[in-house]
Structure formats: C-alpha cells, structure tokens
Image (spheres, rainbow, N blue to C red):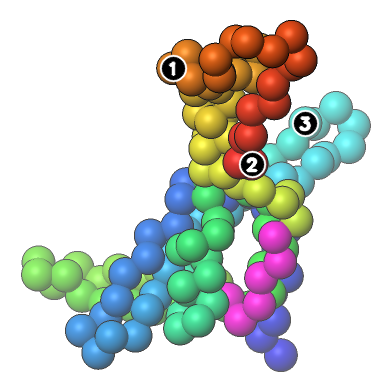
C-alpha cells in the first residue's frame, strides 16, 4: 500500500500552472516537525507536494504560505536525464486529499490589515468621508473582513 498522511505548514505560496493540454497542476512544499525527546530538539523535514485537476485549482486559490494543512496522498519518484546526460531523481507526494487546518492564510490577513489601515485608527475612513459632522451620534464604518 502506498499512502502518505502529513500535517505541516506551507513554506511558500503554491505555484499553479496549466499543462499544454489544459490540465491544471499545483506544486508547493510543506514543512513537518519531528520532536525528539531527551533535549535533542526538533528536526524539520520538507516535502514536495503535487496536486492535479480540481484539487490543484483549490490549492492555488485558497492556500498560502504559513497555512497548516493535512495532506493525504501517495509517494511518487520520477527520474530524468538532463541535457548533460546526468540522471536526476525526485520523490514527491501526489495529493489526492487536503484539509485546511489553520483557517485563513496570510493573503487573507494581509487584505484585512490593509482594509483596517485604510479605515484609520477610529474605524472611520481615512479619506475624511466620515459624514457631514452635524450629528453627535457616533458613525459606524463598514469594514469587509
């Protein structure tokens, strides 16, 4: 049986591309930590992940660097010869299932921070479009999160 289960964090945003046939593929790397007892510390492993078709599109749209994910897939080793005739090997995990464990990624947090920063310290739009100022009642600023 060839089955891999990993829980780790993305080390960078997924790279989503389409093959000449139009088939989408996403590549990304996740880091997993192994904690060793007896004061030996921890060891980090990096795993190359490949997702295809609809799962690739979902990864490209919703995943970002730093997000915690649960990956289910299989190990695959590819080999090829480069132009100089040197043989290369690459082992990767072909994902067939993915669960986002940490909610929103850094992209969404960055958008939220930008919207809040544009609103100003009192929650009012920084552009001064808070209203005509004729009322003593506090005004509410709508912030899309």
Look at mark 2 in the image and give the residue it sits on.
145
Crowding around mark 2 (Cα neighbors within 10 Å: few <14, some 14 to 19, many 20+) is: few
Crowding around mark 3 (Cα neighbors within 10 Å: few <14, some 14 to 19, many 20+) is: few
Which of label 2 and label 3 is nearer to you? Answer: 2
Q: What residue is rendered at 61% in x and 41% in y?
A: 144
Residue 64 is marked as none
Give the quadrant of residue 23.
Answer: bottom left
Residue 27 x, y percent position in the rendering: 43, 64
**46 relative to 16 in the view: left or right:** right
Q: What residue is rendered at 61% in x and 81% in y?
A: 96
Which of label 1 and label 2 is nearer to you? Answer: 1
Query: How far is disc 1 from disc 2 in space, using C-alphas?
Result: 19 Å
Query: How far is disc 2 from disc 3 in space, using C-alphas?
Result: 38 Å
Q: Main secondary structure of the magenta part?
A: strand
| Mark 1 / mark 2, whichever is N-terminal | 1
| Mark 3 / mark 1, whichever is N-terminal | 3
The N terminus lies in which quarter of the figure? bottom right
Give the quadrant of residue 133.
Answer: top right
Crowding around mark 1 (Cα neighbors within 10 Å: few <14, some 14 to 19, many 20+) is: few
Look at mark 1 in the image and give the residue it sits on.
127
Task: Give the total of numbered labels.
Answer: 3
Q: What residue is rendered at 66% in x and 70% in y?
A: 98
Tell me, yes or no, whether the highlighted magenta stretch contains residue 96: yes
Look at mark 3 in the image and give the residue it sits on.
41
Secondary structure of residue under mark 3: strand
Q: What residue is rendered at 45% in x and 57% in y?
A: 14
Q: Start and end of the magenta stretch?
A: 94-100
| Residue at the outermost left position | 83
Secondary structure of residue under mark 2: loop
């Amino acid at each position: 049986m060839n089955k891999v289960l990993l829980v780790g964090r993305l080390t960078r945003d997924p790279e989503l591309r389409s093959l000449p046939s139009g088939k989408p593929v996403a590549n990304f790397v996740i880091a997993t930590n192994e904690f060793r007892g007896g004061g030996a510390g921890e060891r980090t492993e990096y795993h190359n992940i490949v997702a295809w078709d609809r799962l690739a599109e979902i990864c490209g749209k919703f995943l970002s660097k730093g997000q915690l994910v649960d990956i289910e897939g299989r190990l695959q080793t590819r080999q090829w010869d480069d132009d100089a005739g040197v043989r290369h090997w690459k082992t990767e995990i072909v994902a067939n299932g993915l669960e986002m464990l940490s909610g929103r990624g850094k992209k969404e947090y960055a958008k939220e921070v930008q919207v809040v920063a544009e609103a100003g310290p009192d929650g009012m739009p920084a552009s001064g479009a808070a209203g005509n100022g004729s009322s003593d009642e506090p005004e509410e600023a709508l912030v899309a999160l």
